[in-house]
Image (cartoon, grey):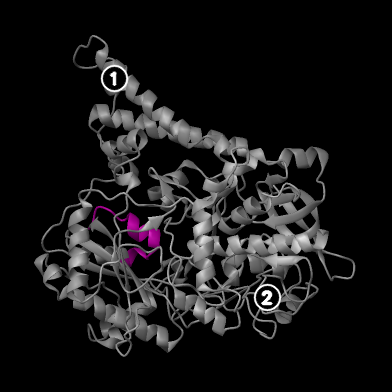
Amino acid sequence: MIFSATFSQCRLCILAVLLLVIVVIAVVASTTLASVISGDSPPTVTNDTLPGSSCASSAVGSAEALVGSLFTAINAAKCEMTRADQWPADFAEEALNNGLREYDFVIVGAGTAGSVVASRLTENPRIRVLLLEAGDDPPIESEIFTLSSSLHRSSYAWTDYAETNPNCCQGMRMGRCYWPRGKMLGGSGSMSGNIFLLGNQQDFDRWRQLGCDQWSWEEMQLLYEKATTASMHAASVKPVGELVLNYFEHLAEHNDLTRLVLNASSELGLRYIPDLAEGTRVGYTEAIPANIKSGRRMSVAKSYLGEVARTRPNLQIIKNALATKILFSSDNSRAVGVEFLLRGRHQLKALVRSEVLVAAGAINSPKLLLQSGIGPGENLIELGIPQLADLPVGHNLHDHGMLPLLLSFEREIAVSQSVGDPQSVADYFLRQSGPLAASISIMGFINTNASSSSQFPDLHLVSHTIVPAGTDRNTFEFLQLRDEIVDGISRAANNRSLLQIYGSLLRPQSRGRMRLRSADPQAHPLIYNNYASERADQLTLLRYVRFVQRMCATRAFRNYGLQMLHVPIEECDKLAYDSDAYWLCYVKYLYIGAWHPVGTCRMGADTDSNAVVDQRLRVRGVNGLRVVDASIMPEITSGNTNGPTTIIAEKAAIVIEEDWNEKVA
């Protein structure tokens, strides 16, 4: 369902007011907000316990004034977070009433890449850009990044499921891998964990070996420096978007967990990483850079696009606009525009003088190309779509994936208060601090190959949250694990706290693909993720399990009695527990997506038959069309992919403007 901007804002206000009412009731009546959020039955609230109503004891008015002051302060903070002017204005009504002019560039997708490119290109006042976004402004849950999981399976997300794969995701509902993506300004960058990692030098060395010699680690670092200092060089009358990065706040209660994990990793010979700005490398750290500021998400849609859009008449954005087809010239040699569906009912066209730039992400970008006749013939022919260019669109799909392991504590460890606790809510809205503004993660990078002394890792570990077993199922709901597995975890934990460790392959060998399910642009795609189909990936995951077991043997972990939790899985429990065969069976059930898809519009040299785009991101075989997002990666980078996508877009904006200047000169 696609909401209009007005309806969305009203909905947010209603939700926020309801939340605030609950908070005030909870503060006054000593009711925990956590019980409301979790669905547990709260204490009965009668008219006598409501703020401002007749209370059991008498009052002279000052107490009611204090409660009113609290409500006013929190409401003001909420209003500040949901200001409409932090986002670009919607040009939709103007388009419906007066039509659309011709643009120099039409960009499809206002996610991370699209926001950067639109912002950078329109620094040149001679360049006119139209940016189309299928979603709307992000809701308040996006601003409070710790509530991002609540956006899954909502109108702010694309919700897809991969086709059944016997090698992975068997423990998920329906036995299929879950594929969420953001459907709003900022795209997945408005609902992800905010983490910003560039990857490492070896990633880009591999790109060069694959024929992408114009993409170097040194250039990525220079572009990163430009992105983080852009506003320092901006004239006051011409704001320039920039990358906003800070470290997560860490609560005092988090210190015990930090010391525990860092001490254990040190016992195993892993060094502490004080700064990841120079790239991911073997070691552990709690200093995790992220797109945040004062407890709020700072997606590039806000810091690049929202920061500048209202001051640039040469930049127009249309929201709730689903691109359905790329339009081509009569001889099919050049892209000349985009057809899109506005608010689910108005079919419009936007024409371009120069290029169409597709920045819809690793699933929706290839989907749009296929809908437009660019891709493998067998898929297009069976759907009756005329083929314009025979390219391997949708191939080379891969993702880090992640395998959760659970460890149980015999000795309890400090746990921060719930994010739903009234104090947590007040701390966040009044001071932008507390659990709602904090991270409880420690991050590690290891090289599991015993024959290699390389400092380049092949596995990414995130030691995440402490979960009171049996009282907080949100983590497992978020992962979409089957109910019987969640119940089995709760029984095995026996009311002990749990440490979760997620292991992700930094160099997965398995490759999948996506195809069109139907010629209908609104149909869900076919996704064949093929996680863990390669033996090499299975063996790396097995080495990950053994590494965590070595952590359990360290003095630091033994001091807390940490040991691997035996998760009941009927098929695996027929095998000898802790055998290699057992853990490979565990992989079949619990190796799931990390939601970092890349590669489906692969970049490569002109001689590379597996490439969809060249090194300047131009789609091969047609003119006036480029792809700018994570789908162009020939191989995935070593860490969360939102950071490299930002830098890819920075480079793309440079080469696009270079080519534009050459044409108009």
Residue at (25% x, 48% y) in the render? 251
Tell me the magenta residue range: 469-485
Res. 576 image quadrant: bottom left
Does any portion of residue 134 appear in the rendered image?
no
Res. 421 image quadrant: top left
Residue at (65% x, 46% y) in the render? 319
What's the amino acid at mark 2?
Asp
Image side of residue 638 versus residue 356, left or right: left
Residue at (63% x, 41% y) in the render? 238
- Give how far apart the Cα atoms at labels 2 and 1 are: 63 Å
The residue identified by callout 1 is 66
Q: Nearer the viewer, residue 386 or 566?
A: 386
Q: Residues within 10 Å of mark 2 (few under 14, many from 20)?
A: many
Residue 456, relative to residue 372: is it above or below?
A: below
What's the amino acid at mark 1?
Leu
Res. 105 image quadrant: bottom right
The tag on residue 614 is 2
Find numbered disc 1 in the image and state the secondary structure of the residue it sits on: helix
Q: Position of residue 634 (x, y in %)?
A: 57, 77
Q: Residues within 10 Å of mark 1 (few under 14, many from 20)?
A: few
Residue 240, relative to residue 325: is it above or below?
A: above
